[in-house]
Amino acid sequence: MALIAITRRCELPAEEAWRRLTRWEGHAAHVPLTRIVVETPPPNGPGTRFTARTGVGAAGFDDPMEVVRWQPPQPGAAGHCRLEKRGRVVTGWAQIEVAPDGTGCVVRWREDIRVLRLPAVFDGLTAAGGRLMFGRAVDGLLAGS
């Protein structure tokens, strides 16, 4: 599996950063050739399911995910979200932590992904590509774009 770790400090209050990072449909604007469909009604919480479809037409794959831990940030306490990837192509997990820090917050995004049928020798490349892609997504979401 390829471990990806991203840390960002931002001036947003933790609650706002959390809201931006957990608006799942918004992630598609920052991941090329991807659209996201949330399959469960609001609000977000354990059991929320969504699928990221990456590709063009029939040439692509689904990355279904489910929220298994949901603890929004509170004054003075970090928020934690854990997603389990349940796909046929991509498996693993992602964790989002948003911790208050002064007037802003610190965001920690960790992801451990495995691309099925891709030999482990490519895990380093997968991790490097993931850091680039997910880092760009986190930056864009926090910027509100």
Image (cartoon, rainbow, N blue to C red):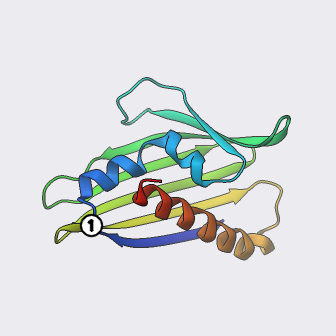
Task: Provide the residue designation for mark 1.
Answer: 105
- Furthest toward the left, the residue is 75
Image quadrant in which you'd find residue 60:
top right
At horizontal 51% and vertical 33% (from top left) the residue drawn is 49
Label count reads 1
Q: Is residue 92 above or below residue 4?
A: above
Element type at marker 1? strand
Q: Residue at x 69, y 53 (%)?
A: 32
Query: Left or right of 45: which side holds 122?
Result: right
Residue 126 lies, with reference to residue 142, above or below; the image says below
Tell me: 64 left or right of 23: right
Determine the residue positioned at 45% across, 63% down: 109
Q: Position of residue 103 (x, y in %)?
A: 17, 68
Q: Residue furthest top?
A: 41
Q: Nearer the viewer, residue 109 or 20?
A: 20
Image spot of residue 48 (x, y percent): 45, 33
Q: Left of 67 or right of it: where is 86?
A: right
The x, y position of residue 37, in whole percent, is 58, 32
